[in-house]
Image (cartoon, rainbow, N blue to C red):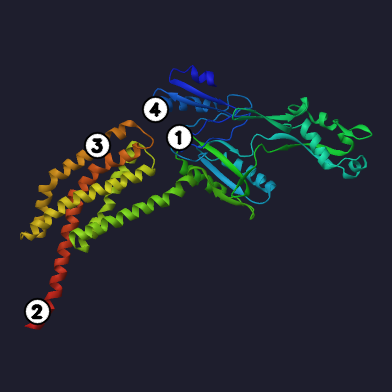
C-alpha cells in the first residue's frame, strides 16, 4: 500500500510506522494502540483537493484489497473521536455482550451510508486453555506455579531474568525456548514436563488442553467490560445523521436488561462539547441584552433588538446550505460574530431614529429617514465584514471555513433584514406604546374635568 501511494503524483511524502503508531503530532490527535499487526502512514499531498481526490479514489478500492488485512483511510481533522460511529454495549457478562454485538452487526450492515461495520472484538486469536488435574500433578510433585513457570518459558514472550542497560535504554533479558514464538496445540499437548525423580511426562497426562478462539482485544469503559460496534461512513455523509439512523434501527430490537447501550464516536464528542458552546452563546446573548438596556434605558427597545438576533439564523442557514457545509463548532462562533454585526448596525440605525424623534419627528418619519441616512454606513460595514472573511471561505479549511461561510453569507442577508424588518418592528412597537399611553391618560383627564 505504501508503494501504491508513493507512485501517485498527488502524494508528496509518506511517513510510515510499522509495529507502532505515530507520536502525537497534533493537539487533537490521540496515538493509536500499536502492535506487531499494526502499521500507520501519514500521507502529505499537494493540496487539500488532492487529499480529497486520493481519499475518494482509494478508500473504496483498497479497504478490502489485501487478504487478512483491514485498511482504514482517514482525513486528518480536529475531532478527538477514534471512530466516526461507535455504539458501546457495557455489562458484567462478556458472553452476553458478544452475543448482543454480533446480532446488532447484522442490523448495522443494513443501514444506508455505513461501511466497514465491525466490532471491537474483531481479529480473534488462537489460544489454548490448560486445566491442570490437581490430583495427578500433586502425585508427581507438580503444582500450578511450576506448570505456569515452565510454560511461560516455552510458550510465551519468555521469563524475564535481567536487564542490560545501554546508556539510558534498558534491554530486557528473557529466558525462553525456540517454541515460544511459534507452536501448535499438538506441540503443547505433547510438551514434556520435568518431574523430579521420574524424568519427563507429557502435559496431556496431568492437564486437559483444548484449543479456543479468544477476542483479539478486550476493552473496558469506566471499569466495566464493554464491546463496541464500530462503523465508518460514506464520503460526504453526515455522521450524526447516520448515528441517529443506526440507533433507530437498533431500537426495534430487544436488548437484555443487563446490557447498557451508549453512543460514542463523533456523536459523543459533539454532544459533550455542545452544551458548553450553547452555554457560552446564552451568556453572550445576556451580555448583549444588558448592554442594550444600559444604552437605551428602555426595556422594550432592548428586547426588540434581542429578538432581532434571530434574524441571523436565516442568513447563516442559507450560507451553510449553499456551500454544503456541516454545522460545527466554528459555525456557532461565526453565528456569535454575526450577532455582534447585527447589533452594531441596528444601534447605528436606531440611535439616529431616536435622535430624530427627540427633534420632533413622528415615529414613522424618524425611522424612515434614519433607514435612508444610515443605509450607506450599514452597507459599508457589512461589505467590509463580508470581504474580510473571504480568504477563510476560499481557503477551504476544515476548521475555519464554516465560520467564514456563516459570516460571508449571513452578513448581507442580515443587512437586508436590518433595513426592513427592524424599522417596521420599531415603528409598530413605538406606535402601539403611544396608543396605549393615550388610552391610559383619557379616563384620568375626564375625571379631572
Label 2 packing within 10 angstroms: few (<14), some (14-19), many (20+) = few
* Image quarter (top left, top right, bottom left or bottom right) of the C terminus: bottom left
Give the CA separation, mark 4 to mark 2: 75 Å
Task: Provide the residue designation for mark 4.
Answer: 48
Task: Provide the residue designation for mark 2.
Answer: 445
Task: Provide the residue designation for mark 3.
Answer: 388
Q: Earlier in the sequence, mark 4 or mark 2?
A: 4
**Nearer to us in this view, 54 or 40:** 40
Q: Which mark is residue 107?
A: none
* Image quarter (top left, top right, bottom left or bottom right) of the N terminus: top right
- In the rendered image, residue 290, in percent from the top left (x then y), is placed at 25, 59
Task: Provide the residue designation for mark 1.
Answer: 26
Quadrant position of residue 70: top right
- In the rendered image, residue 171, in percent from the top left (x then y), is placed at 65, 29
Q: Earlier in the sequence, mark 3 or mark 4?
A: 4
Label 3 packing within 10 angstroms: few (<14), some (14-19), many (20+) = some
- In the rendered image, residue 392, in percent from the top left (x then y), is placed at 31, 35
Amino acid at each position: 500500500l505504501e508503494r501504491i501511494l508513493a507512485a501517485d503524483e498527488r502524494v508528496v511524502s509518506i511517513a510510515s510506522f510499522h509495529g507502532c503508531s505515530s507520536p502525537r503530532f497534533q493537539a487533537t490527535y490521540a496515538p493509536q494502540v500499536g502492535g506487531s499487526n499494526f502499521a500507520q502512514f501519514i500521507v502529505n499531498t499537494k493540496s487539500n483537493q488532492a487529499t480529497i481526490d486520493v481519499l475518494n479514489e482509494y478508500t473504496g478500492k483498497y479497504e478490502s484489497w489485501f487478504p487478512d488485512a483491514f485498511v482504514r483511510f482517514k482525513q486528518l481533522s480536529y475531532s478527538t473521536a477514534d471512530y466516526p460511529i461507535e455504539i458501546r454495549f457495557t455489562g458484567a457478562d462478556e458472553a452476553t455482550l458478544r452475543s448482543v454485538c454480533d446480532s446488532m452487526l447484522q442490523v448495522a450492515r443494513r443501514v444506508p451510508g455505513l461501511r466497514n461495520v465491525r466490532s471491537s472484538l474483531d481479529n480473534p486469536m488462537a489460544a489454548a486453555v490448560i486445566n491442570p488435574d490437581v490430583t495427578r500433578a500433586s502425585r508427581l510433585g507438580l503444582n500450578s506455579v511450576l506448570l505456569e513457570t515452565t510454560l511461560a518459558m516455552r510458550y510465551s514472550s519468555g521469563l524475564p531474568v535481567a536487564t542490560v542497560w545501554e546508556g539510558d535504554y534498558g534491554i530486557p533479558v528473557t529466558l525462553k525456548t525456540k517454541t515460544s514464538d511459534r507452536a501448535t496445540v499438538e506441540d503443547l499437548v505433547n510438551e514434556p514436563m520435568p518431574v523430579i525423580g521420574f524424568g519427563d511426562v507429557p502435559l496431556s497426562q496431568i492437564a486437559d488442553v483444548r484449543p479456543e478462539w479468544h477476542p483479539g482485544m478486550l476493552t473496558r469503559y469506566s471499569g466495566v467490560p464493554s464491546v463496541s460496534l464500530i462503523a465508518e461512513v460514506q464520503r460526504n455523509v453526515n455522521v450524526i445523521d447516520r448515528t441517529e439512523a443506526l440507533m433507530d434501527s437498533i431500537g426495534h430490537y430487544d436488548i437484555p436488561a443487563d446490557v447498557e447501550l451508549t453512543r460514542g464516536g463523533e456523536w459523543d464528542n459533539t454532544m459533550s462539547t455542545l452544551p458548553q458552546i450553547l452555554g457560552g452563546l446564552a451568556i453572550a446573548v445576556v451580555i448583549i441584552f444588558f448592554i442594550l438596556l444600559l444604552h437605551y434605558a428602555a426595556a422594550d427597545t432592548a428586547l426588540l433588538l434581542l429578538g432581532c438576533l434571530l434574524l441571523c439564523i436565516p442568513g447563516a442557514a442559507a450560507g451553510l446550505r449553499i456551500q454544503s457545509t456541516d454545522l460545527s463548532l466554528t459555525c456557532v462562533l461565526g453565528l456569535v460574530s454575526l450577532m455582534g454585526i447585527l447589533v452594531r448596525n441596528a444601534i447605528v440605525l436606531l440611535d439616529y431614529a431616536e435622535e430624530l424623534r427627540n427633534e420632533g419627528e413622528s415615529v414613522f418619519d424618524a425611522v424612515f429617514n434614519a433607514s435612508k441616512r444610515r443605509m450607506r454606513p450599514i452597507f459599508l460595514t457589512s461589505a467590509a465584514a463580508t470581504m474580510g472573511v473571504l480568504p477563510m471561505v476560499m481557503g477551504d479549511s476544515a476548521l475555519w471555513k464554516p465560520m467564514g461561510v456563516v459570516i460571508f453569507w449571513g452578513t448581507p442577508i442580515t443587512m437586508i433584514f436590518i433595513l426592513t424588518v427592524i424599522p417596521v418592528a420599531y415603528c409598530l412597537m413605538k406606535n402601539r406604546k403611544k396608543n396605549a399611553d393615550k388610552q391610559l391618560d383619557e379616563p384620568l383627564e375626564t375625571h379631572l374635568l
